[in-house]
């Protein structure tokens, strides 16, 4: 058994582990509360005092995906017996289903815009980071700072010109417009992070490839890209988290067509008041894709972030 | 070998053409690689910024489409800088910024330090801790109003359980002295993991050999922490502070959903105030000037900070 | 011939008969706030779709961002909405900036007259300038602030006895705001069914319009006026009269002594939550919630009663809510949109609207002899609609509203300064807005 003097002792490990687990459990409570609220009935969700134990209900999920109307006796009669369990859940609340809600569309918009902008951002960001890392780009440091500075503008301040500009270009309330916008916002972070990762890759590899007769471009995608995969993956997580959850631009620039889920979820109104179970159900479903993405890439997340961003 | 033909052709031709045959020159590749990024940033960031600067010298209002736009010079700037209300939103922003950074750096670094002790299952627990930052800030803000509700929310009951206080005896959002802390707590809950991740990356980048050498010199753990760990993690920590600082200076979604800026104006951060001017009062020219002032402030602070960061790196 | 075929023939006959104006079937988008009545409108509009062949799409935005989003849409001449059920205060801007189509000729051509609608709704939702016969909307949804109370608690003999002992009078629906305050204070902190309950849920929201829509119910009844009735935009002494300050003090007193802890940023849905979960004896809210209260498992079915905003020394008024339906000037489908309004104005449709929980503003519906008894809250709705007052409907209403939100929240919730100072400050803010607008 090899023994390293830098390896912490078992007691230290126990202590550290205990503290971290304690923090993790505390930090989980609000999250678990959100998830649990999604499975409560409307009355239980606002119960006073709050209910920790409750009878699970699918009201929240049914309400999330449907628009309902409070039923008058005539309507109930005309509608006949419920066709399936979804309708049954609505009937139990004294409502009939008027149609599907917009949540599905909003969620799909988020998928298209979130993943679309992340992909575009990775392509542009990797290319730019490679160029900054390997070539003598004039005014390199200034350009790098310029790229970072674009993240400093409060979104609200530029929202009006962007709004007017998008309307002129026909990009207003479109998926493409939002993809371009989120890509631009994320580029600063991704160029900074990726440049660090690429700096880490020894130049000798490419030189060897060039000597073997690869073109610069071939060397880039056959040698550099595979080496930078870790960094690209961990950068992608951060870009996705931002684009997925962005609110200010989404609420100001999108409406019927390209609106994403974040402006939609907090405002889900049921029949009579805010529908907390549906809000919670929406929040839970919305968390899932990023969570899965992160868990899949967690090795990269932990190994990667900002590695070389600081080393020149 | 497929390249040999081109290679041979290249040898026999002048350098310019050789490069063409091999592919694009380095300079054009650099250009092709950087141009889309710069173009996109110019179009979506810089052009609107310039437009904003232009509008800031006018009395334009989006909701008065039929009125002529007049050039008003520096009037908007004078009005803003002379407005006591704006200074109070700046103060609220500074308070929020300072405390979120302090708390997130302290907790985030401690967590990273503990996780770096490599206890069993540290990977899994790290992933769990990271979860809150994957939520949408707007949804988080919205849900924390629910958690902070004295009668039906969990937070007051939890505090009551620990301290023995009556949950209904205090209101995190309603009380003038507690509301600024309500937003700090929610933001810290959400973003501490971000700082933690960056610190963890920093800690893991320190080679074991340095500690081994210190161990041979019989330096105490305490001394090792101050002379090795902290200085080497510092650049990472500073980067985390930079990113969080920029983000929280612009903070909008979480707080707007959580408190709406109240009570009174206690949690009206600059971005919330700016949004009222720009998208509720529709004073486009005025709010453009406001935006420019905020931008210049962050830009100035960040420039100084990045200079300091570069110094730390060079050490 | 199949049955379905028959129906479609009948439907097309109808289209030819009554909707001859529009040629093609269109996709119409109607924009409104996301709330209870909007769901009912989806249901109601199915008849329109069947009759006209047009397809209805709906864009509902929650109240707290409704004004931002929709005014943004109008100001940028957006074509998202063909029909807009815009808030009552937008009518001035909608008319002056050309966002809404003027409907006078359309009304005349189709035999729609504003005399058929409740006068307060015509003034409140359709006219600009106020008091002139220029119409930019058809009253669509009548709404007004009123009160809901726990009838079961009010009728509990023990509670009644305790109240009588304390106040020397019977516990009942309050006739004045001071009585309402007493009742709310009486319930504050009381144990009922093993739970601590509180007095009243009132509007205190900061971000959009909440606290203004709430406090005005006290201000109006104590003598607050928006301007000199003789001289437009003359504010001093009317907005900030000592009587008005008394009204605001009363509102703060209710907030401080008779609302649940943490009720500092509450608007419609928070008040509903507090009431439904049994925290409060009374809630202030717009009438639109009443059908929902009646249907609720915990507080509905006779456990709740309703009363109009109680009087004050200067009279009895209530804050107007509600909206008219307008055709957006930037829409390319205006004919189809007008078809919708024409269909919507029919008495049968309006009466079904009421049955679904939509507050019709049509006299034929509300003056029907069976109306008052049709729902437990119907009479309260009628009484309340008779005493309404509305906020400014000027094009600059948003500026005026933001100033009022700021001043009121600072005083009532944050406890900054005095009521008089808050209203004096409001006069300053409003004067500045009107000067900017060139009205002063």
Image (cartoon, coloured by chain):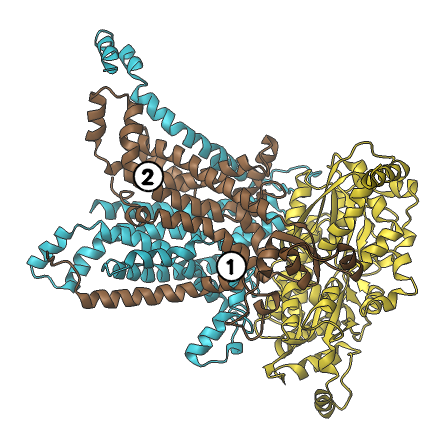
Chain coloured yellow in this rendering: C
Identify by letter the chain in cyan.
B
Say above or below: B167 vs A177.
Answer: below
Labelled disc at residue A194 = 2
Q: Is label 1 on the same chain as label 2?
A: no
The image quadrant that residue C8 belongs to is: top right
- Name the one closer to the observer, B34 or C256: B34
Alpha carbon separation for disc pair 1 and 2: 31 Å
Side of C304 relative to A252 (left or right): right
- Residue at position x 57%, y 71% from top? C262
Answer above or below: position of B99 versus B45: below
Q: Give the number of the disc on residue B141.
A: 1
Give the image location of residue B65, x and y in percent: 69, 39
Q: Position of residue C367 (x, y in %)?
A: 91, 62
Chain letter, brown in picture: A
Residue that sits furthest to the top in the current view: B12
Q: Is residue C237 visible?
A: no
- Nearer to me, A126 or B292: A126
Residue C25: x percent and y percent? Answer: 78, 35
Mark 1–mark 2 CB contact (< 8 Å): no
């Amino acid at each position: 058994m090899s023994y390293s003097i830098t390896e912490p002792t078992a007691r230290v490990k126990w202590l550290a582990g205990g503290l971290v687990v304690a923090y993790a459990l505390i930090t989980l409570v609000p999250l678990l509360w959100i998830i649990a609220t999604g499975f409560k009935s409307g009355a239980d969700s606002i119960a006073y005092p709050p209910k920790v134990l409750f009878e699970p209900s699918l009201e929240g999920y049914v309400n999330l995906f449907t628009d309902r109307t409070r039923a008058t006796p005539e309507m109930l009669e005309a509608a006949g017996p419920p066709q399936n369990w979804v309708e049954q859940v609505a009937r139990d609340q004294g409502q009939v289903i008027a149609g599907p809600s917009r949540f599905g569309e909003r969620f799909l918009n988020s998928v298209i815009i979130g993943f679309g902008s992340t992909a575009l951002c990775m392509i542009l960001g990797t290319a730019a980071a490679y160029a900054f890392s390997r070539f003598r780009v004039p005014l390199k440091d200034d350009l790098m700072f310029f790229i970072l500075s674009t993240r400093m503008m409060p979104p609200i301040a530029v929202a009006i010109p962007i709004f007017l500009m998008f309307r002129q270009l026909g990009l207003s309330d479109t998926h493409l417009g939002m993809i371009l916008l989120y890509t631009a916002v994320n580029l600063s972070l991704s160029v900074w992070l990726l440049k660090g990762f690429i700096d880490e890759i020894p130049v000798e590899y490419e030189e060897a490839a060039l000597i073997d007769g690869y073109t610069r471009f071939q060397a880039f995608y056959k040698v550099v890209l595979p080496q930078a995969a870790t960094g690209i993956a961990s950068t992608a997580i951060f870009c996705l988290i931002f684009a997925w959850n962005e609110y200010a631009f989404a609420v100001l620039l999108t409406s019927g067509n390209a609106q994403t889920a974040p402006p939609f979820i907090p405002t889900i109104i049921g029949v009579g008041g805010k529908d907390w179970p549906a809000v919670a159900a929406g929040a839970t479903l919305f968390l899932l894709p990023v969570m899965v993405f992160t868990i899949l890439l967690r090795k990269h997340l932990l190994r990667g972030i900002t590695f070389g961003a600081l080393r020149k | 070998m497929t390249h040999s033909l081109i290679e041979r052709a290249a040898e026999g031709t002048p350098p310019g053409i050789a490069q063409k045959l091999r592919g694009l020159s380095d300079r054009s590749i650099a250009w092709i690689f950087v141009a889309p990024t710069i173009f996109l940033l110019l179009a979506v960031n810089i052009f609107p910024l310039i437009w904003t600067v232009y509008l800031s010298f006018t009395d334009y209002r989006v909701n008065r489409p039929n009125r002529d736009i007049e050039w008003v010079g520096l009037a908007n700037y004078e009005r803003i800088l002379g407005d006591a209300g704006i200074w109070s939103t700046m103060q609220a922003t500074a308070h929020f910024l300072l405390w979120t950074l302090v708390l997130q750096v302290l907790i985030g670094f401690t967590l990273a330090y503990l996780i770096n002790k490599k206890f069993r299952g540290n990977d899994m627990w790290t992933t769990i801790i990271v979860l809150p930052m994957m939520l949408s800030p707007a949804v988080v803000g919205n849900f924390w109003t629910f958690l902070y509700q004295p009668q039906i929310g969990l937070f007051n009951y939890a505090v009551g359980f620990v301290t023995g206080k009556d949950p209904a005896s205090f209101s995190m959002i309603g009380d003038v002295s507690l509301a600024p802390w309500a937003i700090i707590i929610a933001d810290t809950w959400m973003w501490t993991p971000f700082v933690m991740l960056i610190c963890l990356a920093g800690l893991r980048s320190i080679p074991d050999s340095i500690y081994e050498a210190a161990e041979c010199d019989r330096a105490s753990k305490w001394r090792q922490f101050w002379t090795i760990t902290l200085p080497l993690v510092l650049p990472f920590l500073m980067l985390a502070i930079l990113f969080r600082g920029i983000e929280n200076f612009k903070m909008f979604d979480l707080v707007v959903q959580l408190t709406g800026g109240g009570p009174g104006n206690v949690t009206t951060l600059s971005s919330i105030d700016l949004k009222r001017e720009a998208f509720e009062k529709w004073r486009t020219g005025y709010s453009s000037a406001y935006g420019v002032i905020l931008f210049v402030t962050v830009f100035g602070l960040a420039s100084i900070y990045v200079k300091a960061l570069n110094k730390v790196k060079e050490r | 011939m199949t049955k379905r075929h028959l129906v479609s023939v009948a439907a097309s006959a109808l289209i030819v008969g009554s909707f001859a104006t529009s040629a093609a079937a269109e996709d119409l988008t109607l924009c409104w706030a996301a709330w209870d009545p909007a769901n009912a409108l989806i249901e109601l509009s199915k008849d329109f779709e069947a009759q006209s062949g047009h397809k209805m799409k709906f864009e509902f935005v929650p109240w707290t961002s409704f004004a931002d989003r929709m005014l943004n849409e109008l100001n940028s001449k957006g074509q998202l909405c063909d029909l807009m059920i815009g808030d009552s205060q937008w009518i001035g801007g909608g008319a002056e900036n050309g966002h809404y189509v003027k409907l006078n000729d359309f009304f005349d051509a189709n035999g729609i007259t504003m005399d058929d609608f409740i006068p307060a709704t015509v003034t409140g939702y359709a006219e600009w300038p106020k008091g002139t016969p220029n119409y930019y909307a058809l009253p669509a949804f009548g709404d007004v602030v009123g009160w809901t109370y726990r009838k079961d608690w009010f009728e509990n003999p023990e509670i009644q006895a305790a109240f009588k002992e304390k106040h020397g009078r019977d516990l009942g629906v309050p006739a004045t705001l001071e009585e309402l305050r007493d009742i709310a204070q009486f319930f504050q902190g009381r144990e009922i069914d093993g739970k601590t309950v509180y007095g009243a849920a009132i509007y205190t929201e900061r971000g959009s319009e909440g606290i203004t829509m709430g406090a005005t119910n006290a201000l109006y009844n104590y003598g607050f006026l928006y301007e000199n009735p003789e001289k437009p935009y003359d504010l001093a002494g009317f907005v900030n009269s000592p009587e008005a300050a008394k009204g605001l003090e009363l509102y703060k007193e209710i907030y401080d002594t008779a609302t649940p802890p943490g009720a500092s940023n509450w608007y419609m849905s928070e008040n509903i939550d507090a009431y439904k979960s049994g925290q409060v004896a009374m809630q202030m809210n717009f009438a639109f919630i009443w059908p929902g209260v009646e249907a609720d498992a915990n507080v509905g079915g006779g456990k709740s009663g309703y009363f109009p905003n109680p009087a004050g020394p200067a009279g009895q008024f209530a804050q107007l809510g509600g909206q008219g339906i307008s055709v957006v000037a930037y829409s390319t489908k205006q004919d189809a949109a007008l078809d919708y309004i024409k269909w919507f104005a029919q008495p049968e449709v309006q009466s079904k609207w009421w049955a679904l929980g939509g507050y019709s503003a049509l006299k034929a519906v509300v003056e029907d002899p069976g109306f008052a008894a049709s729902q437990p809250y119907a009479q309260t709705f009628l009484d309340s609609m008779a005493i309404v007052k509305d906020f400014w409907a000027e094009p600059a209403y948003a500026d005026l509203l933001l100033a009022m939100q700021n001043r009121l929240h600072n005083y009532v919730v944050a406890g900054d300064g005095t009521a008089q100072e808050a209203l004096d400050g409001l006069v300053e803010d409003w004067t500045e807005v009107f000067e900017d607008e060139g009205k002063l």
